[in-house]
Amino acid sequence: MSTQPGTGPETDSGTDSGTDPAARAGYPDHPPRVGFFTDTSVCIGCKACEVACKTWNAVPEDGISLSGMSYDNTVSLDASTWRHVAFIERIGHPGEADAELPGVEITPAVEAGSSRWLMSSDVCKHCTEAGCLDVCPTGALMRTEFGTVVVQDDICNGCGYCVTACPFGVIARRESDGGAHKCTLCYDRIGDGLTPACAQACPTESIQFGPLEELRERAAARVSELHESGVAEARLYGEDPSDGVGGMGAFFLLLDEPEVYGLPPDPVVTTRDVSRMWRHVAAAGAALAVGALAACLRGAGGRS
């Protein structure tokens, strides 16, 4: 396992670094943590972010076909779609109630005879507690000095452990090269003081980039503004450092429940219970060893 800063499983080096992933990854002196705040209330679904991401990062096309899902033909994030603009159509037909997801209480999106469109540009969450990074056996996934998570293509062996470790289904393997790929938050650009390509291209500033703490303050003010304007359903998703992934480096302002946008309501880092599981395994192994030794001693005593 590599001992270079940013690679390998992260460990908490002190109480002050608990929510500082860069410090935990071995960067004692580092820039402020940066990330994305995506305000879906002003997203117009233009897909400029998708195009800019592909262009700057040389991400290959992901299939030219019609999905039948409104204007959403990329469908989801994957190895060749690092930004995905989702179109959620909520149609209220005359005489019919707005459909609800099974087991989920959702504020009615539209009245009968009207319609409502929800649009959101999804991306890797760059979690504080990143399960993908924890399970990578080669150190291909690394934490940067900006607190983001990137894949080093030349080190990835294509094992796919990170794919199953992500609670959001963000990271995937590309058939053409077998490696895992996802958003890097334009690590090469931010290292030169530039804005990530997707945020730079967004015409409505739905995608905002900057220091994470500043973005959280800006997001809270925006939610308050929407509530005062009568948009009671506005809420933040992923900004809370006490959630199951320690807070996200890319969080969102939503206008409905997370499930409507295809997001898990209560995400939890998939490696949360690994240490506890290994302790149980060690205890079971020790018990077996003691039992085997006792049996050997009894056998030896009987023969004597």
Image (cartoon, grey):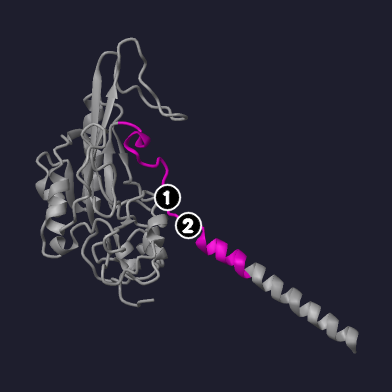
Q: Is residue 42 above or below residue 98?
A: below
**Near-viewer residue (213 or 100):** 100
Give the amino acid type for the residue marked by disc 1 in the picture: Gly
Q: Earlier in the sequence, mark 2 or mark 1?
A: 1
Give the amino acid type for the residue marked by disc 2 in the picture: Arg
Task: Tell me where residue 87 appears, x and y as whole percent.
Answer: 24, 34
Q: CA distance from mark 2 to mark 1?
A: 9 Å
Say if the magenta span includes residue 47. Answer: no
Q: Are marks 2 and 1 in contact (CB under 8 Å)?
A: yes
Task: Tell me where residue 16 appears, x and y as whole percent.
Answer: 36, 63
Q: As drawn, is 31 to the left or to the right of 128?
A: left
Q: Is residue 237 above or below residue 126?
A: above
Q: As drawn, is 97 to the left or to the right of 51?
A: right
The residue singled out by tag 1 in the image is 244
Secondary structure under the numbered disc 2 in the rendered image? loop
Q: Residue furthest bottom?
A: 304
**Near-viewer residue (154 or 205):** 154
Callout count: 2
> For the C terminus, which image quadrant?
bottom right
Task: Determine the residue positioned at 25% across, 26% down.
Answer: 231
Range of residues picked out in magenta: 256-282
Task: Determine the residue positioned at 11% across, 38% down.
Answer: 204
Please identify the quarter of the rendering in which residue 171 is found.
Answer: bottom left
The residue singled out by tag 2 in the image is 272
Task: Determine the residue positioned at 51% across, 61% down.
Answer: 274
Q: Is residue 250 above or below residue 255?
A: below
The dot on residue 188 is none
**Near-viewer residue (14 or 250):** 250
Secondary structure under the numbered disc 1 in the rendered image? loop
Task: Determine the residue positioned at 40% across, 48% down.
Answer: 243
